[in-house]
């Protein structure tokens, strides 16, 4: 038991998470009521068997068909394929990895310029996905070699969140566990009418950081006032340095099926770990 404890204490925790994790413990004790940590991939688990290629068929009504024909879209859909699988099923280590890749498919009415832009955007996104997943897999392999009697598991999966006549949004989930776990999401949204990756200034202008940050704070305060179990690092006088002030310029987000921006924070970004990954819908 003592040997296992020493190995567990050697498990690497992301450097930028250490201070927030310690503060989360203090804050959670003050609350005295904590929610059970969210079940990992409760949504993804129900769809994993049919993930390989996820397509949403367009509305076939004459009105929708006419509207779609009027848009210079790059094609009806992007296709998502699994380009790498990595599985480990051992007593102490497990891995369930499915690395996705976005493949643009040209359709009628798409210009050569838009098609080229779509390919460039997809290539950039795929490179970012590969980099993030390769790092997680390599770290997992190194831990297996270095800590043979330790414990660890990783899960990499993805889900298409939106695929309509305008927007394509993909959610890539990376989970790393060793006693406790850390879950991270990376979202990617493409505007089909231009083939470009969407950015927050497209929706809220150059002052998007301030506009979105204030909207997020308002929702945080409302949620905390309505539920004593909800906690965000906001308006805390004892640890003001840890309070959420504003989103970064490269804030993670996606577009939902209602066409609204959804701001996404990973574990420990703006709340204690028991809150899991949190999202805020910003209506336009």
Image (tube, grey):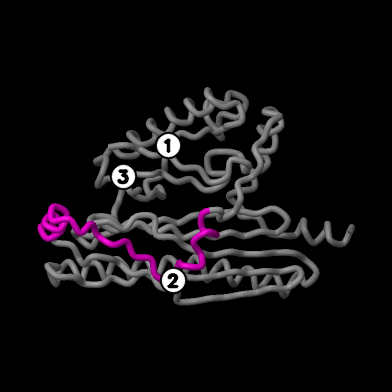
| Pointer 3 or 2: first along the chain | 2
Mark 1 in CB contact with mark 2 (< 8 angstroms): no
Look at the picture and state if 238 lies above or below 152. above
Nearest the viewer among 56 and 124 is: 56
Determine the secondary structure under disc 2.
loop
Picture coordinates of residue 113 (x, y %)? 15, 69
Q: Is residue 89 left or right of residue 101?
A: right
**Span shown in magenta:** 43-71
Instruction: Mark 1 vs mark 2: give the one in front.
Output: 2
Q: Is residue 46 rendered to the left or right of residue 118?
A: right
Quarter of the picture containing the C terminus is top left
Query: Which residue appears at 41% of the width and 44% of the height?
Result: 263
> Which of the 4 image quarters holds residue 1?
bottom right
At 42% from the left and 34% from the top, the residue drawn is: 216
On screen, residue 237 above or below 147: above
**Nearest to N terminus: mark 1 or mark 2:** 2
- Of the numbered discs 3 and 1, the one sitting upstream in the chain is 1
Q: Which numbered marker is on residue 139?
A: none
Q: Position of residue 79 (x, y in %)?
A: 33, 69
Q: How many residues crowd around disc 1 within 10 Å: few (fewer than 14), some, or many (20 or more)?
A: some
Q: Is residue 83 left or right of residue 236?
A: left
How far is disc 3 from disc 2 in space, using C-alphas? 24 Å
Q: Which residue is mark 3?
A: 258
Q: Please identify the quarter of the rendering in which residue 89 is found.
A: bottom right
Q: Disc 1 designates what residue?
A: 246
Per the image, the residue denoted by label 2 is 52
Q: CA distance from mark 3 to mark 1?
A: 25 Å
- Which residue is outermost to the front? 61
| Picture residue at 29% right of the left edge, 54% below the top | 198
Q: Tag 1's secondary structure?
A: loop
Front residue (pair 160, 190)? 160
């Amino acid at each position: 038991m003592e040997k296992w404890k020493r190995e567990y204490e050697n498990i690497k925790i992301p450097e930028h998470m250490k201070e927030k994790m310690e503060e989360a413990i203090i804050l959670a004790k003050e609350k005295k009521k904590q929610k059970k940590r969210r079940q990992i991939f409760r949504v993804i688990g129900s769809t994993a068997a049919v993930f390989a290629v996820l397509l949403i068929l367009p509305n076939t009504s004459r009105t929708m068909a006419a509207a779609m024909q009027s848009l210079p879209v790059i094609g009806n859909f992007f296709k998502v394929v699994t380009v790498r699988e990595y599985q480990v099923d051992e007593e102490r280590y497990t891995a369930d990895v499915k690395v996705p890749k976005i493949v643009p498919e040209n359709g009628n009415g798409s210009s050569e310029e838009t098609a080229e832009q779509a390919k460039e955007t997809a290539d950039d996104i795929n490179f970012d996905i590969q980099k993030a997943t390769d790092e997680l897999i390599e770290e997992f392999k190194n831990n297996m070699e270095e800590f043979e009697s330790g414990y660890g598991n990783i899960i990499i999966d993805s889900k298409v969140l939106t695929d309509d006549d305008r927007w394509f949004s993909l959610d890539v989930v990376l989970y790393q566990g060793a006693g406790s776990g850390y879950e991270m999401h990376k979202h990617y949204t493409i505007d089909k009418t231009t083939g470009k990756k969407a950015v927050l200034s497209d929706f809220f202008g150059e002052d998007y950081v301030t506009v979105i940050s204030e909207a997020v704070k308002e929702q945080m305060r409302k949620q905390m006032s309505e539920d004593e179990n909800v906690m965000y690092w906001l308006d805390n006088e004892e640890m003001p340095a840890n309070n959420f002030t504003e989103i970064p310029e490269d804030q993670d987000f996606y577009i939902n099926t209602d066409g609204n921006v959804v701001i996404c924070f990973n574990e420990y970004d703006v709340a204690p770990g028991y809150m899991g990954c949190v999202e805020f819908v910003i209506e336009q």
